[in-house]
Image: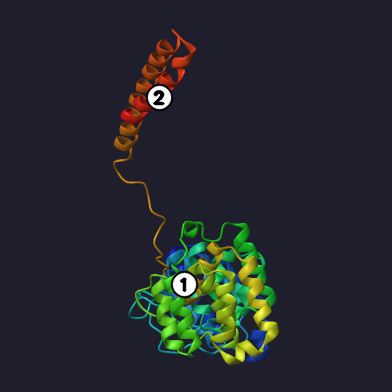
Amino acid sequence: MRPDLVQVLLRVQTDLFAGAPARARDGSQAFESLALALIPRAEPDTLRYVARQLAQLPHTPGSLLRAIAARGQDLGLAHTLPAAGGAASSAAPTGPSPGLRPGGAPPAVSTGLDLALARDSHALLGERLLQDMVARARRVPDLAEALLARTDLPARSLAPLYLHADQARRAALRSAMAQDGGGASHLRLVRPTRERIAALHDAADIGEKAAFGARLAQGLGLPAVPDWRFEKPERHDCLALALLALGASEEDAIRIFLILDKALARDVATVFGLVEIFRRTPRSVACALIEAIYEISIALPQRSTAPADVPRIIDQASAAGRGLGATAREALRAGSRADSPAQGRSTGGRDSVRRAIRDGG
């Protein structure tokens, strides 16, 4: 079929389906079969038109939503297609759209296409599509829940949704990230100074949560202070993870658990849970999770590296060692000659060796 006829036929059949009585639409398998055959050949304007028409219907078949999403991904329109289930506007754009709001942030509205893909365990989500869906799911609980329920998605990709997960799923995420390396770029981060930890303790002791958060951000090398909100029950884990990412000791972390927030300190079970997280989570995983949850980039200093003139230093040391060895050998030979005439002069030979080594050094 000619491409232009595909577009016309798909639009007309979609109009007929959308305008049919609800009872007729429910049993219209013919339209579903036809649309599934035509959607893979839909052009951008036609795909947006079909998606907009079907979005106004309360029970669009999931197979059509998945087909539209797949075609939209092929055409780079994954974020411009209207929401299903009646959430779309009749004024949806018909021209090209970058699919991003000002500032580059993806739309925060979950679409029926997102949910259909997330809930379909057989739907393969490419890396870019999954990343975009996770970005929207950060602000859409039902989409986050659908993605977290899947066991076939990489734990690292789901890390930004950590706050949406229950305790069992959080533990599974930490474990999976630990098994796959979970942030190996952070393995060389050094521990903070005692002065920095003391500053955190001082702020926690007097209940200055703002000062505590600012000093923690400074210790992590952040240009701005994140909205930590550690006092929120769903963010208690983040306190343990942030202190672990900083490189605090277990003793320091436990002290902070007990003094930073009175409500937290009184919840013994929660404190024990945070200690377990601190003990069992690799520091690299803690760094990766904190970065993903708060959308930040940790910039702790690296371990000191060798100076650029190491070869010259090594050569100088080797030369000095060779010189000292030659001096010692000469002294030993002199000592042997001095010892041979009489046993009583052996002490003088040993003294010569000592003087020679001292002078050579």
Residue bearing mark 1: 78
Question: Residue 168 or 272: which is nearer the viewer?
Answer: 272
Residue 335, how many percent across, how many down? 41, 16
| Residue 252 drawn above or below residue 127 | below
Left or right position of 281 against 91: right
Question: Residue 114 or 328: which is nearer the viewer?
Answer: 328
Q: Amino acid at mark 1?
A: Ala
Residue 227 in view of the camera: no
Residue 317 in view of the camera: yes
| Number of other residues with Cα within 10 Å of mark 2, as a class: few under 14, some 14 to 19, many 20 or more | few
Q: Quadrant of the C terminus?
A: top left
Residue bearing mark 2: 351
* Residue at image coords 63%, 74%: 148
Q: Amino acid at mark 2?
A: Asp
Question: Residue 145 or 229: which is nearer the viewer?
Answer: 229
Determine whether the residue tagged by mark 1 lies in a helix, strand or loop: loop
